[in-house]
Amino acid sequence: MNPRKLSILLGTVLLHGVLYGAAFLTVAPFLWMALTSFKELSEILVYPPKWIPGKFITDNFVSAFQSAPFGRYYFNSIFVAATVTVGQIITCSMAAFAFARLRFRGRDVLFYLFLGTMMIPGQVVMIPSFMVLHWLGWIDTYAALIVPGLASAFGTFLLRQFFLTIPRDLEDAARIDGCNRFGVLWRIILPLSKPALATLAIFTFMGVFNDFLWALVVVSSDEMRTVQLGLAIFRDRYQTDWGQLMAASVTATLPILMVFFFAQKYFIKGITLSGLKD
Amino acid sequence: MFVIFPLFFSFYLSFHKWNMFSSESVFVGFENYGSLIRSSEFWMVLKNTLIYTLGTVPLNMALALLVAYFLNKKIAGKRILRTAFFTPVIMSSVAAAVIWRWVYEPNFGLLNYLLSWFGIPAINWLNDPTAAMFALIMMGVWKTLGVNMVLFSAGLQGIPEHYYEAAEIDGAGKWQRFWSITLPLLSPTTFFILVMSVIGSFQVFDTVYVLTSGGPLGTTKVLVFYLYEHAFKFFEMGYASAVAYLLFAIIFVLTMLQTKYFKGSVHYTM
């Protein structure tokens, strides 16, 4: 083997080593979480740290679910996230259809106004939104968690851009066959927009399921808590009970991780489109 | 409805003294803004937010570009690697912060153990006023690296292959190709990521809340945490609205900059 080939080979090996090393460091906290959640306390508090549990136990999960109503938190989170997701798909697809296909006065101005709201951070409108909900008497109800999330400028934008790529001929044909506007949206556009709808659905679900600040602000009673809020409170109460804390964290992350592994490309698409942060 | 109205209402509030529970509000003019500027805590909070931003954004972007650049090459198991780097992004920040508390644990934590291999003595990460911000920054980089990696990847794939081929024929080396083709052609992406990252780090809250609760000694208290505290712990809605408006102003300026720059630069002309 000549020296040039050897140096290329070495470079490739080194590059792989560094990348895999960095990737391992990135996932190490997850692994450690998962492994810790199956350990006995005597194996958790050891130095140097031990990776693989000597005996896999599930006691941490059992006691975490006994110390706090995680089942209830789960139900709340999934119910809220699912409702917001369905709601957003309905409102965003109708708004996007209007912006993409209908002609009405001030449409473009309205659209830019819509887009403009995308750059207003949630924290800025948090206080007034809270007060409106307070006047409505909605604080500490599902409505407080769901209603403010039902419309989304990002979702409307995403769907509008997709709708614009669908050829009009199809719709014209449908119109001639006697299909009304709603029928066009329902029978022609939506079935053709499945990838965009999937991106929006997954992105919305993840956002709502992982949301913390808004839930922290509008929820006060234990039975209305979401998983993230419940976990934060649990963390306050069981400061150093690492086994239970890790079991609770595994529980709080599992649904999204599962969805992610099956629908990775939609997540990545959503990120590319929005450049969204946590 | 939940954006436009609150925006104006928030502006109105910021000129009033308003306690949630009394029904009347008193017009106080610029007093909320005045006391904001006079408050030494506010300046500390602003400084903390800036330190966090300066600590996370450049490091994050440099690492993300590096990873994206190498993942764009012939690498075995590209998908697995990309998934690994992206996983922290989809995880809830509360759960992530709980895990990192365990990583930072001073006696049995993973990080101190790792550092002990290099002879570095144990650090009480979350209770030491200088280390706490550092801990927050490290976690912040870890959490959002995947986002920027994906954005950089998209940018890199948008650079036409024949530019590189032409440069190679002209005898440009690897580094020269990187500096004279990749970086300049990537600059709109880079600028976009920069602005989005700065905006994102000005909004950091969840991880602060769980990891340090703003402590020790307020060294990790950031802007949104300060806003939350004043609005929902002390119920000073007027004052908190002034903080919110300041945050909005910062983000607004950044976004305008972004839009302007984007319109003014088209790099793909030959």
Image (spheres, coloured by chain):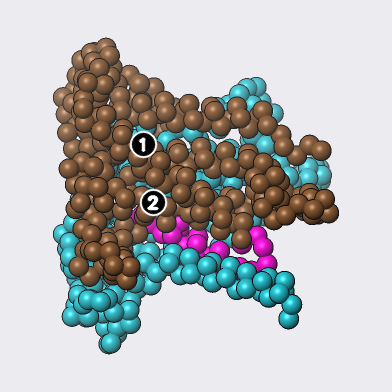
Q: Is residue A169 above or below residue A16?
A: above
Give the percent coordinates (x, y) of residue A245: 24, 66
What's the CA distance linking mark 1 and mark 2? 14 Å
Q: Magenta stretch mostly in which secondary structure?
A: helix
Q: Is residue A43 above or below residue A186?
A: below
Q: Which residues are magenta?
A: B71-94
Chain of the residue under the numbered disc 2 shown in the image: B
What residue is drawn where x is 26% and y is 83%? Answer: A57
Give the percent coordinates (x, y) of residue B268: 75, 39
Give the residue type that dot 2 points to: Gly
Chain of the residue under the numbered disc 1 shown in the image: B
What residue is drawn where x is 40% and y is 69%? Answer: A28
Q: Which chain is cyan?
A: A
What residue is drawn where x is 56% and y is 32%? Answer: B258
Give the residue type that dot 1 points to: Leu
Pick whichever of labels 1 and 2 is earlier in the sequence: 1
Write down the colour of chain B.
brown
Q: Which residue is mark 1?
A: B50
